[in-house]
Amino acid sequence: MLKCVHKTISVGVATLVLTSISAFASFNGKREAVDGGMIYPRANGIYTAYRYNDQNISHFNYGRKPTPNELKAWDTDIMPDGTGLPKGKGTVAEGDELFEEQCAVCHGDFGAGGLGYPTLTGGDRASLTNQRTPGKTDAPKRTIGTYWPKASTLLWYIHDAMPYAHPKSLSWDETYAITAYLLATNEIKLDGKEMDDDTVLSNENFLKIKMPNEDGFIPNIDGPNGVKNVKAFLSDGKNIGAVGVRCMKDCKDDGAKLVVVKDPRTDVNPPFSEVRDLPKKPKDSSIKPGQEEYEKSCAVCHGNDKMGAPDVGNKEAWAKVMKKGMDKVLATAIKGTGAMPPRGGSSYSDEKLKQIIEYMYSKSK
Amino acid sequence: MKKNDKTSTDSSSLVSDKTSSSRRNFFKKAAVYSASAVAASSLLSPVKLSAEEKDDKFITEEQPWATSLGYELNKHPYGVPSPYEHNVVRRTTPLLSSAGDMHAAVSLTPLQDLKGIITPNGLFFTRTHNGVARIDPNKHRLMIHGMVKNPIVLTMEDIKRYPSESVIHFLECPANGAAEWKTPQFDSLQFVKGMVSCAEWTGVRLKTILEDVGVDPKAIWMLAEGGDGSSMSRTIPVEKVMDDAMIVYAMNGEALREEQGYPVRLLLPGWEANLSVKWLKRLEFGDKPWYCKEETSKYTVLLPSGKAIQHFYPLEVNSIITSPCPEKPWTDLKKGDIVEIEGLAWSGKGTITHVDISFDGGKNWVEAKLKGLVLPKAWTRFSYIYKYEGKELMLESRATDDSGDTQPTVNQEKKIMGVEGVYHRNSINTWYVKANGEVHNAQMRS
């Protein structure tokens, strides 16, 4: 696979040099990126198809140094090795109460789900090998107990992101308590022992939690070779399903049959439509009766006073008009007067005209 | 119109009308404006047509928009699409949300209606974990610290003062097509592939800022944290940061939309869009990964072995035929019509080099033409001119990139990844074109 890749690239480069037809000639990339993909050279003001400013000026020195307090306020992440673990403690029983008050509405009693929001407890790790292929309906259960590799993630995430509508509202003591409760309901052990109602979880014993699925993830990202491991892993297509072949004729795909969508889902919003028409009148309360007709047929003259029409927004002018009484004004508008054509040049009904005039007046009070 | 007609509505006479205020002029102007309400004229003395001929009344009759005054040009200081395009919108489904709660959900781009390689800002797909944050740009700060020589705090003014670059890149949610792992579920291009969009992004290369900051060579990881309610965070290898990562504040020529992280987001070209952290407020450098919620509980790919892939960054080579598609079928075509098959291809690992088309579900392929700009980690349009025969087709596209990757078949991908991984599905898609031109979502699979 790799061999063939290099061939393609060198052919691409040769084409570029010989005929200088760039087309998509790989932009001189090399398959050396950390994601297993291409890195493109950036030199002499050229980067792939882009030009950039290569004056090579660096060191702008914008911004300023954060204060120690600012760092303290924002540097609140918690790492698996205990870096950033805040002081605090709470019991499973306290967590139980807090969870019921603040979390169960969405995550269900005991975090068991069922309400559409993420399920936090239940299932067993053996389920992770479940595959819902035809005839098999049991899903893998990805919960804190079966799936999450690190307990620090839970403490950090609950504090920063939950409860959903009021994130960052829990104290650290409360966060330790809820975390203790969720670990206990997931039957996770603290220092090798099951957790009961009175178990206290704190910054002192937090690192003694053992997550059951800690070794469930590949590649290994820990240690100084973490990034190298990722790069090696992602660069091998067999690891990530990048095994497509550019076959052109009589290609084999054993057992493949046409499967056409059956009972397609239609629960989408807004409903599917490719029609080009005017939207149904929105029941937009901000659009007043008569407003649209005014804008369409009358605003051209009544939007300003240049023509001698009583301009909408001009209190005085409209006070003078309306002093005559609606019946008279409407009659004049129907008949037309001076530079005002009959019905303003429209064919609106008397009733509609009245509505428009009421709108015009309402905007001029 | 008469040459010396003062009532003409060309702009010069409008200007002079402003200063003139004679009653005579009012009257003339009024006459002109009210004339616009005169009914549509019809064709004078029409010719008799032969039996096969038929007049199109939209040609022979005047239409209202041609016989009336349009609306004032400043009606929408910020322009809006024609109301006739009101069905071209992002769509959501409760299936891709938490309990139908649209604060933690995804909205999908109407790929069937897009042209070229740029997604309009109002149609860019959106995924949020705690709703769309509304941030006051005057109060927003970006802090860069950790294993660095000179930690800094930047305001938006500071960030915008750095030399800027503009690049065209797609962003894709790795869950794009996730509903289709086990079987086709939607009969819609928008829902099969709509968690991807492509824009021109403007901002500063992160490397430029980091030259001042001075990253410790032992720091191999960077934490990026968002300023939204969920403090969305991810761990990123410094190697990527120093390659093509950017801090961007503009898309398609204007400020980022709030849904895309206003006022500022990270941009990691080609990688899971979730890594391009929105509402970016903090970057911390370190020598260990952070194990954030979105790189442990989520955005990890469960394999049939029960092990899961973590830190699975690149969106692999992908493509989809956008015309025809379930939303844009061939039901109006006649046998023998010439029609363009068109689509989009992209790869997070490099640049598209080839797209092939199959009419028989992947047995035989012909190469399509690429068209328009062909850029790294960006949407690339492909095209194939086809003579429609009114026959049943199993229409597929298959893209290849310059890293040497070609899209796998459903079976090839399934064999390694299983069907429970949720993320990173990039196998070949099939449109089943019926003899009557209807197009339905399908897969070739065993």
Image (tube, coloured by chain):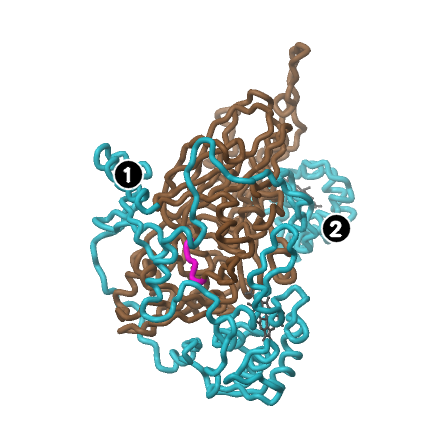
Chain colours: A cyan, B brown
Q: Are marks 1 and 2 on the same chain?
A: yes
Residue A173, position as x, y percentages in the image: 54, 86
Q: Secondary structure at mark 1?
A: helix
For numbered disc 2, what is the local secondary structure? loop
Give the residue type at disc 1: Gly
What's the residue at 69%, 46% (across, down)? A281
Looking at the rendered image, the quarter that the C terminus of chain B falls into is top right
For disc 2, the chain is A
Q: Residue at x 45, y 36 (%)?
A: B12
Q: Is residue A254 above or below residue A239?
A: above
Q: Residue furthest front?
A: A254
Q: Nearer the viewer, residue B365 or A327?
A: B365
Residue B25's place in the image compared with B346, above or below, is: above
Q: Amino acid at mark 2?
A: Lys
Q: Residues within 10 Å of mark 1 (few under 14, many from 20)?
A: many
Q: Please state the extent of the stretch shown in magenta in the rendering.
A: B310-314
Q: Earlier in the sequence, mark 1 or mark 2?
A: 1
Q: Quadrant of residue A184?
A: bottom right
Residue with the mark numbered 1: A12
Q: Residues within 10 Å of mark 2 (few under 14, many from 20)?
A: few
